Image (cartoon, coloured by chain):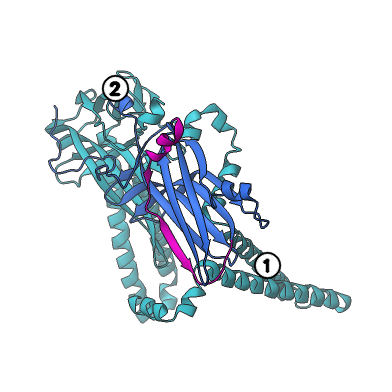
Amino acid sequence: MNYFKRLIDRIPWQRRLTVGFWGNETEAIFAVSLLGIGVVVFIWCVVTQWMAGLVSPWTDLVPRILGMVFSGAIIILGGFRLIRALYSTAGSPEHRSRFLQRALDLDYLKALDPALTSAPTVPKLPPGRIGNGERLRFRINDSKQSRGRWLGLAAFALLMLGVCTVLVAVVWEQWEVLGLERLLMTSAVLVVLVGVTGGLLWKTGRSLVEQIQLGPTRVELSHHPLVPGIDFQIFFQQVGKIRLEKLGLVLECFEQTTYQQGTNICTHRQTTFEHTLIQSEGVQLSEDEPRHQVEFHLPDNAMHSFLSASNQIGWRLVVKGKKSGCPEFTREFPILVLPKSVARP
Amino acid sequence: MQGASTPNAPLARLPLRSPTNSVPQVVAGSLFECQYRVLQNEGASSNLVTTSVACSPPEEGELGRRKGLQSPDSSDLLPESDPIRYVEHSILWQTTGKGDRDFGIHLFERRKVSSQNDGQIEAFAGIHGPAIFKTVSPLAPLSYQGLSVSIDWLVRVRVFLQSGRQLRFELPFLLVVDPAIASN
């Protein structure tokens, strides 16, 4: 890749065809070409369909209809690219962004929530994530990621089980027809699949038992959203029926960035601040215990929550625990930190 | 049971760079004004476009304006006579770092230069005279320098020439919280 980049640098006319003003021009020319080809093919399909209709409407009907659909898709693609190229050519990035912002400003919800207007980059937690607490004012519900992982694993295990069942049924029905060689080959594949499926089912079962034994986690805050420089209380309770080697609650700030690497889109997350609020060892979970209430002072110079298209700065409370013989489990509770200038303008 | 903090974890914080004379600080939510000048000198064989951008809290009189911090004059040499078509100024934030660059506009204005050499319009667009605009500084996002992403605020002036060429001049500034609010 570096070799080709250096090559392009030595040939400025080629580079100019792909970036900046001329990059937009060549994209517009390509879009017009696509549009032209799509229109020509579409018209040809329509004309031939009409002419065929005069003689025999059902002859080669399917290829002509497919041709019309395909050419219609090319017209839409070319039209979209042309509009995008013209839009990119007109004006500076700031002008285009302002134009888009004016369209977004029409959102009537901004009249109801001043924070949406004054701090559009401060993210909002989805509804249902914050509820009323019993001990403290706000209860934070965990993100669905941990449950989503278990459900994904269970769904994949069930899919593999279905595939194995079908294969076994086919081999059982057709073993006389298959012949020895094919039977041995199919059996070998089947053994591998059954092994993988068995492993997935065992892991899914263990995760399910862990979820049942572990019980729900309750995290409550005295203040939400948080503001740098304030003191706030945290109530934490983990119920269950097992004994854990370690159990802790950590406040984290993270940065998440999304970028393109070739044709892939990559996401990178990095923890920039970590403070252990609670750390226990050898904990026996029960219906009520353990539970802790601690106080914490959010640093004055802490960064507020931030969300843009490709970058995010967020805060979360993470419950980390480990059972003997099992990998560590985590449960995340996202929280919001507002800038002082917004919380108290 | 109260735990201990991780010893070497950096705090999430506002910009790590200490304030210097070259990067002005603007308090979030305060009124501040910016002025810029675009000078086009027609020489025998070349034109020179220079732009300077200055920001300061608005105060009474000329002294208030001079108190602001000023970017060094930026200049660009053009090979032929190339009059200015229009001038844009904007206040925006942008992210830098590992992720794709995002930006958001707080203030944007475009001022077209008349071809009839109308002195009033040229002054309005910052040509041959300072263009001044005032605004309330944004409340968020605050300036930030992190490990994989940074948030920078800047005043940007773009000069569009008749040939289609663009010249860009910027003055970065730090958006900070009012110290009076920060101490409460």
Circle 2: residue type: Asn
Q: Chain of mark 1?
A: A
**Colour displayed for chain A in the image of the structure:** cyan
- Position in image of residue B56 (x %, y %): 40, 38
Mark identifier at residue B81? none
Tell me what residue is drawn at x 61 percent, y 38 percent.
Answer: A106
Whether residue A58 is visible, yes or no, is: no
Is residue A150 positioned above or below B58 on the image? below
Magenta span of residues: B60-83
Q: Is residue B79 magenta?
A: yes
Q: Chain of mark 2?
A: B
Pointer 2 residue = B184
Q: Which chain is blue?
A: B
Q: Quadrant of residue A72?
A: bottom right
Tell me what residue is drawn at x 45 percent, y 78 percent.
Answer: A12
- Of B147 and A262, nearer the camera is B147
Q: Nearer the viewer, mark 2 or mark 1?
A: 2
| Image quarter in which the N terminus of chain B is found | top left
Q: Is residue A304 magenta?
A: no
- Position in image of residue B174 (x %, y %): 35, 42
**Residue B65 vs residue A314: left or right?**
right
Is residue A205 positioned above or below A140 on the image? below
Pointer 1 residue = A75
**Residue A95 vs residue A161: left or right?**
right
Circle 1: residue type: Ile
- Of B46 and A291, nearer the camera is B46
Whether residue A232 is visible, yes or no, is: yes
- Position in image of residue A174 (x %, y %): 44, 72
Q: Quadrant of residue A298?
A: top left
Q: CA distance from mark 2 to mark 1?
A: 61 Å
